Image (tube, grey):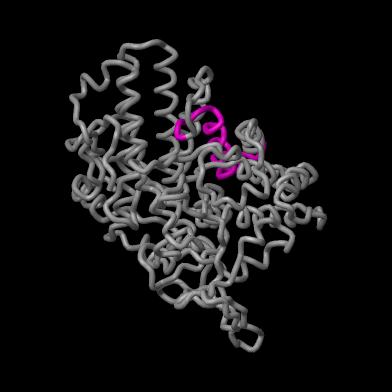
Amino acid sequence: MKKLKYLSLLIITALSFTGCESELETAPTNQANEEEVFKTAESAETVINGTWAKFNDDGPTYANIGYSTVLRTSDAMGSDVAVLTNKYGFPGAYAFTDLVNNTGSRPLFIWSLLYSTINNMNNVLAKIDAAEGSPEKKNQVKGQAKALRAFCYLNLASFYQFSYLKDKTALTAPVYTEPTTTASVGKKKASLEEIYTLIKSDLTDADQLLQQYSRNNKDKIDRSVVNGLLARVYLNTGDWTQAAASAKLARNGYALMTAEKYRQGFNDISNGEWIWGHGQTQEQSGESYAFHFLDVSSSGSYYYSFMADPYFKNLFDTNDIRYSLFSWDGNPGREGLLRYAKFKFKANLIADIVYMRAAEMYLIEAEAEARNGNVANAITVLNQLKATRNANLYNGSPAQNDVIKEVLIERRKELFGEGFALSDIIRTQGTVVRKPYTDAAGQAIKVQVTTPDGTVKTVNGRGHSIFAFPDQSAFVPNSRYYLFSIPQKEIENNPNL
């Protein structure tokens, strides 16, 4: 694991004490006493920088490195990624055995990652007003801390309970807004409504606090990122008018990428469509490891495990730029699998990680407009994205439900591998859909592949291999198998759970 190049406070949340400190390598590279760290606004900002670095690049295993773990898990538990079950990393997520098992390492890592980040931001917010520095600098630090805290709570709301629109009173996870220590008593679960109230408050405050802030790189949170997060929040909570408005604000100044740019591998934070991401360097490149799962076409990629469901390919028009990224694998041991070459390593096996793009904001706007009854507006926005991808424009039924269905299909096509699969299933109260790649007679569908020596041959096409939940029940909406579990160690340490 790369060593952090940031000053970071050793602040451990009251949650997940047992095992958390050693497993997550929480000791900072350079420890400093609390008084010095929070003496000035500039030094307080280093806590945010250090927390962000650990949030992205640290982890106990190569399968659990930073926030990418959440994104890869979400996609592995969806309909369109056919994970290779003989490869390291995400077979358990794909089979719905990882997250339902609250004694496993992944639930503990994700929970600890989110809550330790929340606690660090709570420390920043508790101390920034007393720090030395200009009001502008304090506002910047406070705004970024509130936004990052809101982002963590949004993940808790998105993965640890069913849709807000199903039951906003459902108890989900504890809310902490003050710093905690190892002596703090854990809190009881808050409802989705309570969590979303805090998220909206934090993001609304951040939008005001960051008015004068101009960031120097896309790792930083500015008002575009804040509005993008607000768009996600309003979509989750059914505030369609606000969702559309926030999405439009977020994408302002971020043009949809060209078809040629789409082919280049989704690995560069300088891409003009990217609103937010995490840049990687040779020295700080822990999260680049995620590309060993995503990249199924580069020779240096080690696991190439996130193959595509062949039925996913059928969603695309043949003239769509994205359609050209599919190819049947002809390599030994991989013959007949479907590669979707959206993600590719840069040189030296590093790759930047995308967290938010303008395309997502177009899709949020289109969905929100459709759900709000403004179907014509929804089709216009949807077709702006389709046109840029060289896809056929939507000219089908103007019925509201048909347009919503089309937008949700477009989300799957456009956001494949970016971490939205499971959260969309939970949000829309949908279901995972997986079926064997066979014909009407139940026989494997044949495909043509090219072997490394150039030989073209016909083999069985291969797709999904898991078609039911671990108890062998069918995939259904609102299943407990979709939800991330609170770690057993946390339950033992917090009697109020």
**One can see residue 237 in this view:** yes
Q: Residue at x 31, y 46 (%)?
A: 58
Residue with the most extreme front position: 453
Q: Is residue 128 magenta?
A: no
Q: Is 237 in the magenta?
A: yes
> Magenta residues?
219-241
Residue 370 seen in the figure: no
Q: Quadrant of residue 396?
A: bottom right
Q: Position of residue 425 (x, y in %)?
A: 54, 57
Residue 442 in the image: state x and y as whole percent: 60, 87
63 shown above or below 496 = below
In the shown orientation, is residue 256 left or right of residue 331?
A: right
Please tell me in which quadrant of the rendered image residue 249 appears: top right
The answer to which of 364 and 91 lies nearer the viewer is: 91
**Could you tell whether 430 is left or right of 195 in the image?**
right
**Horizontal and vertical percent position of residue 368:** 67, 43
The residue depicted at 56 percent of the width and 48 percent of the height is 165
Taking 345 as reference, is 101 above or below it?
below
Q: Nearer the viewer, residue 2 or 190?
A: 2
- The answer to whether 222 appears left or right of 109 in the picture is right
Give me the residue at 46% from left, 44% from top: 352
| Spot occupied by residue 453 in the image (x, y as percentages of width and height) | 52, 77
Residue at (23%, 41%) from the top-left corner? 26
* Magenta segment, prevailing SS (helix, strand or loop): helix
